[in-house]
Image (cartoon, rainbow, N blue to C red):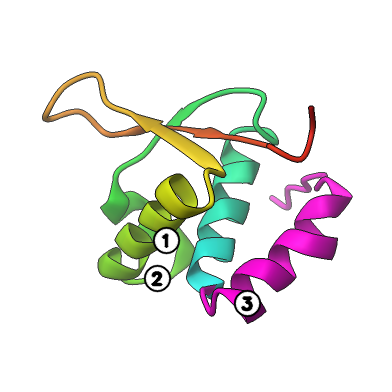
Amino acid sequence: MTRSITLDPYVVDVLMRDLVNHDHSPSAFLVYLWLWARTDGGRRRFAASLSGIALETGLSKSSVQNAVRQLTRRRQLIAVTREGPTTAPVYEVLKPWIR
């Protein structure tokens, strides 16, 4: 089954270039796109383990960890919360370019 997603033009026109060229982090862009699709463009939150994201994106778990760190701390493009120490993190895609 093929699924389509709608991207905000900013994601392709600006964010891709910033993350891939400027930050040298294509894995962060892939993780952001994957989370964008799972959260319906930021309209809902999504729980996933780092291992699960790695499996789905084809990245290593450490690449996903680094990408999540960059997307949360440096770029503030996603928010991550945890219900408890053994539960999967819950991700929220942020769109700071939209006010």
Earlier along the polypeptide chain: callout 3 or callout 2? 3
The x and y percentages for residue 13 are 85, 63
Earlier along the polypeptide chain: callout 1 or callout 3? 3
SS for callout 3: helix
Q: Are marks 1 and 3 in contact (CB under 8 Å)?
A: no
Q: Is residue 56 left or right of residue 52?
A: right
Q: Which residue is most to the left?
A: 85
CA distance for labels 1 and 2 = 10 Å
Part of the protein shown in magenta: 1-25
Q: Amino acid at mark 3?
A: His
Query: Would you say residue 45 sits in the magenta stretch?
Result: no
Q: Amino acid at mark 2?
A: Leu
In the picture, the disc for residue 67 is 1
Q: Amino acid at mark 1?
A: Ala
- Residue placed under numbered mark 3 in the picture: 22
On screen, 85 above or below 48? above
Earlier along the polypeptide chain: callout 1 or callout 2? 2
Q: Nearer the viewer, residue 86 or 19?
A: 19
Residue found 73% across the figure and 72% down from its top: 17
SS for callout 1: helix
In the picture, the disc for residue 59 is 2
The x and y percentages for residue 48 are 36, 39
